[in-house]
């Protein structure tokens, strides 16, 4: 049974949901959608902004006993923008990012990722970060729930990307 459960299975489906919402159609704006690995492999100055990065932020066991566990995963989705406005004023970057952050929020609030039994619920994110290199990073945070049982394994309302999921999830 080793290897049957991908603890972070939701990541790929979150990235795919964001691609559909922010890189497809007439309103497409995201030049790049990646993960923590993408962020680590790209220097700040080489980013293709605006960009979205999906970052796993750990989990909390909300209930557990010897047979079952309810696990709340936390995902932080970061909208990265760049603005060449001179000076230290972050307002232009904040205004540029506003509609993008709204798109990310709407794309994920109520979305049912792979490996989860409940849809994504907004959570309080970390503060935005404004870099000296005129980049700004606006995090949006969500949690989702996974169930594990020692007898039956993982419970999932959506076990794979091929499994349809209503959106927003009822």
Image (tube, rainbow, N blue to C red):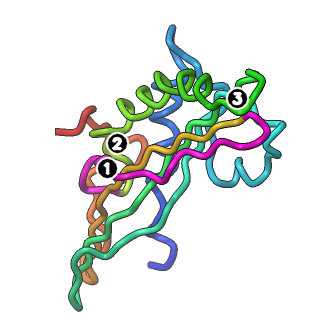
Q: Residues within 10 Å of mark 3 (few under 14, many from 20)?
A: many
Q: What crowding class fits label 1: few (fewer than 14 Cα within 10 Å), some (14-19), or many (20 or more)? A: some
* Chief secondary structure of the magenta portion: loop
Looking at the rendered image, the quarter that the C terminus falls into is top left
Give the residue pinned by disc 3: 82
Magenta stretch containing residue 47, yes or no? no
In the picture, the disc for residue 163 is: 2
Q: Earlier in the sequence, mark 3 or mark 2?
A: 3
- The residue lying at 50 percent from left, 45 percent from top is 139
The reply to whether the C-beta atoms of the residues labelled 3 and 1 are less than 8 Å apart is: no
Q: Secondary structure at mark 2?
A: loop
Report the residue marked by disc 1.
Answer: 158
Look at the numbered disc 1 and give the secondary structure of its residue: loop
**Circle 3 SS class:** strand
Picture residue at 28% right of the left edge, 83% below the top: 150
**Does 117 appear in magenta?**
yes
Q: Position of residue 99 (x, y in %)?
A: 46, 22
Residue 121 seen anywhere in this rendered image of the structure: yes
Tell me where the magenta segment starts and ends, as one range. 116-134
Q: Nearer the viewer, residue 119 or 133?
A: 133
Q: Nearer the viewer, mark 3 or mark 2?
A: 3
* Image location of residue 54, percent across then percent down: 55, 47
- In this rendering, does residue 6 appear at all? no
Marked residue nearer the N-terminal end (3 or 1): 3
Coordinates of residue 102 in the picture (x, y in percent)? 41, 28
| Residue at 32% in and 56% down | 144
Q: How far apart are the alpha carbons under marks 3 and 1? A: 36 Å
Q: Are marks 2 and 1 in contact (CB under 8 Å)?
A: yes
State how far apart marks 2 and 1 are (Cα).
Answer: 6 Å
Instruction: Give the quarter of the image for residue 135.
Output: top right
Q: CA distance from mark 3 to mark 2?
A: 36 Å
């Amino acid at each position: 049974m080793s290897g049957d459960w991908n603890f972070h299975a939701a990541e790929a489906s979150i990235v795919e949901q964001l691609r559909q919402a922010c890189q497809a159609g007439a309103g497409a704006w995201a030049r790049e959608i990646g993960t923590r690995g993408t962020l680590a492999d790209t220097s700040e100055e080489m980013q293709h902004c605006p960009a979205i990065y999906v970052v796993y932020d750990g989990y909390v066991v909300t209930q557990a006993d010897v047979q079952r566990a309810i696990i709340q995963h936390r995902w932080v989705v970061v909208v990265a923008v760049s603005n060449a406005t001179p000076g230290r004023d972050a307002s232009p970057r904040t205004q540029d990012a506003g509609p993008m952050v709204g798109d990310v929020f709407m794309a994920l609030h109520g979305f049912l990722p792979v490996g989860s039994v409940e849809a994504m619920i907004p959570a309080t994110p970390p503060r935005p970060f404004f870099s000296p290199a005129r980049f700004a990073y606006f995090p949006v945070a969500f949690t989702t729930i996974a169930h594990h049982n020692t007898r039956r394994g993982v419970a999932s309302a959506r076990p794979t990307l091929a499994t349809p999921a209503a959106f927003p999830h009822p």
